[in-house]
Image (cartoon, rainbow, N blue to C red):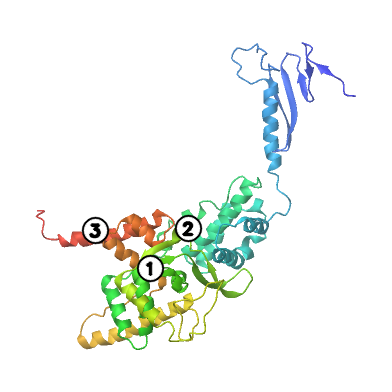
């Protein structure tokens, strides 16, 4: 049995507590953080004791012991399990990621397996430092020739994985936090901005498609893209149940995807729009309504008996002549061919007419969506209405576009007054 020790007042001393010959108290303990034996002293054992030194501001020994044990407990909780790698935390993170759409989740899995797993996945989370993350990003931008935007997308996967390790006490600081921001300060690594078509370019595109025998069938797609600002999956997923001619609105409540699904196969599937804000009703402009009315009158002209069904949705509006659904990459290929053919004809025509050609830039479905947003801002549509019609989740996304467009408008306005103000 352990011998009971007391101080000079007869009070029982706890394990590792001692009273020195000068009357002060000491506590001896093993510091788990440094791995060394340490001791602390105080003139007072309990809070009610008085110190013989009036200038002594040290706490009593018992309170100091409580603080030491609290620090030790926090450290014990943070002791890493042997062999806990980034891959282990990725699996745990994936099992908790239930709030994103399946298509987004598939993208996360592809990016992690393609880029992050081979180089960082097997590393212990306790051995990862910010320099390792930065070196990884630099390699992806430099040697692998990936865009800063794509690497930024990787950071949106890496940071929350390591944040999970922080929250569970395996590491103190997230080594990926803020690394990508530092890299984006480099001017030549700025993300590419999707430019919208100017009014003149938009007119050239529409006129060329409407007058082309080869591409005339694509005009309904072009009109709806430029007249609604819909995302590609929202447009290709439209069914006749989504068109309300009485209310003159298009109900955007789902999106069609053709991507690698969680079952490992490429397939069509329906998801909700990109965010809750994506669920909206877009009023139809006159030209857009006319397109839908024409398509409705002709909807039984081709493949009436063949109606694809995707996750319970059928009666799709936009299909090819064989009745098949349109894919995102197929529409972008058509746009690429249109631009290439237009530019070829325009260069030849401009040479004959001895003028500068009005060339079109490379465009995708998203450029058309951005063009619609630009036209809204140029025509002074309320910013909250722009956010609603575009289905932007955050107002900041709309404001970025708004500010970039208004900057150009400011330049145009200044050009108008050039030479009209007396300055000297």
Q: Residues within 10 Å of mark 2 (few under 14, many from 20)?
A: few
- Label 3: which residue? 410
At mark 3, the secondary structure is: helix
Q: Tell me whether circle 1 and circle 2 mark residues in contact (CB < 8 Å).
A: no
- Describe the element under mark 2 as helix, strand or loop: helix
Q: Residues within 10 Å of mark 3 (few under 14, many from 20)?
A: few
Give the residue number, with chain letter if any, for mark 1.
Answer: 369
> Closer to the N terminus: mark 1 or mark 3?
1
Query: Is 84 displayed left or right of 386 in the figure?
Result: right
Which residue is more in the foreground, 239 or 245? 245
Point out the image quarter for the N terminus.
top right
- Badge 1 density bin: few <14, some 14–19, many ≥20, Cα 10 Å: many
Task: Using residue 222 as the reference point, say whether residue 182 is left or right of it.
Answer: right
Q: Which residue is mark 2?
A: 276
Report the Cα–Cα distance between label 1 and label 2: 18 Å
Q: Eyeballing the image, is 169 above or below 58?
A: below
- Indicate the position of residue 278 as horizontal and vertical percent values: 45, 61
């Amino acid at each position: 049995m352990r011998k009971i020790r007391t101080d000079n007042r007869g009070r029982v001393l706890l394990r590792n507590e001692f009273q020195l010959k000068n009357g002060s108290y000491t506590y001896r303990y093993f510091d788990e953080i440094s791995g060394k034996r340490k001791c602390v002293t105080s003139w007072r054992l309990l809070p009610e004791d008085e110190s013989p030194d009036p200038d002594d501001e040290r706490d009593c020994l018992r309170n100091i012991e409580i603080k030491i044990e609290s620090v030790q407990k926090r450290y014990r909780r943070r002791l890493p399990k042997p062999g806990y790698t980034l891959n282990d935390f990725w699996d745990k993170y994936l099992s908790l990621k239930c709030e994103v759409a399946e298509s987004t989740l598939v993208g996360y899995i592809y990016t992690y397996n393609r880029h992050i797993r081979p180089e960082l996945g097997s590393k212990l989370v306790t051995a990862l430092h910010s320099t390792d993350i930065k070196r990884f990003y630099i390699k992806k931008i430099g040697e692998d020739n990936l865009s800063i935007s794509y690497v930024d997308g990787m950071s949106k996967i890496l940071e929350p994985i390591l944040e999970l390790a922080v929250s569970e006490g395996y590491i103190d600081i997230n080594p990926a936090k803020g690394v990508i921001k530092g890299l984006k300060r480099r001017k030549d690594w700025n993300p590419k901005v999707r430019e919208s078509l100017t009014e003149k370019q938009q007119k050239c595109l529409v006129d060329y498609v409407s007058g082309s025998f080869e591409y005339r069938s694509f005009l309904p797609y072009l009109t709806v893209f430029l007249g609604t600002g819909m995302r590609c999956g929202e447009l290709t997923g439209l069914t006749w149940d989504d068109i309300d001619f009485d209310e003159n609105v298009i109900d955007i409540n789902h999106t069609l995807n053709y991507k690698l699904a969680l079952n490992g196969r490429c397939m069509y599937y329906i998801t909700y729009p990109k965010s809750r804000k994506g669920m909206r009703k877009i009023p139809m402009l006159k030209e857009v309504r006319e397109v839908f009315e024409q398509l409705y009158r002709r909807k039984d002209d081709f493949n009436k008996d063949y109606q694809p069904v995707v996750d319970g949705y059928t009666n799709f509006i936009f299909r090819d002549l064989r009745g098949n659904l349109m894919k995102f990459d197929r529409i972008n290929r058509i746009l690429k061919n249109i631009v290439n053919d237009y530019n070829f004809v325009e260069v030849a025509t401009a040479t004959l007419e001895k003028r500068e050609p009005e060339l079109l830039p490379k465009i995708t479905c998203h450029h058309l969506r951005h063009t619609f947003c630009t036209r809204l801002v140029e025509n002074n549509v309320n910013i909250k209405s722009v956010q609603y019609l575009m289905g932007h989740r955050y107002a900041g996304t709309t404001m970025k576009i708004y500010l970039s467009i208004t900057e150009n408008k400011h330049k145009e306005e200044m050009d108008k007054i050039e030479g009209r103000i007396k300055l000297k």
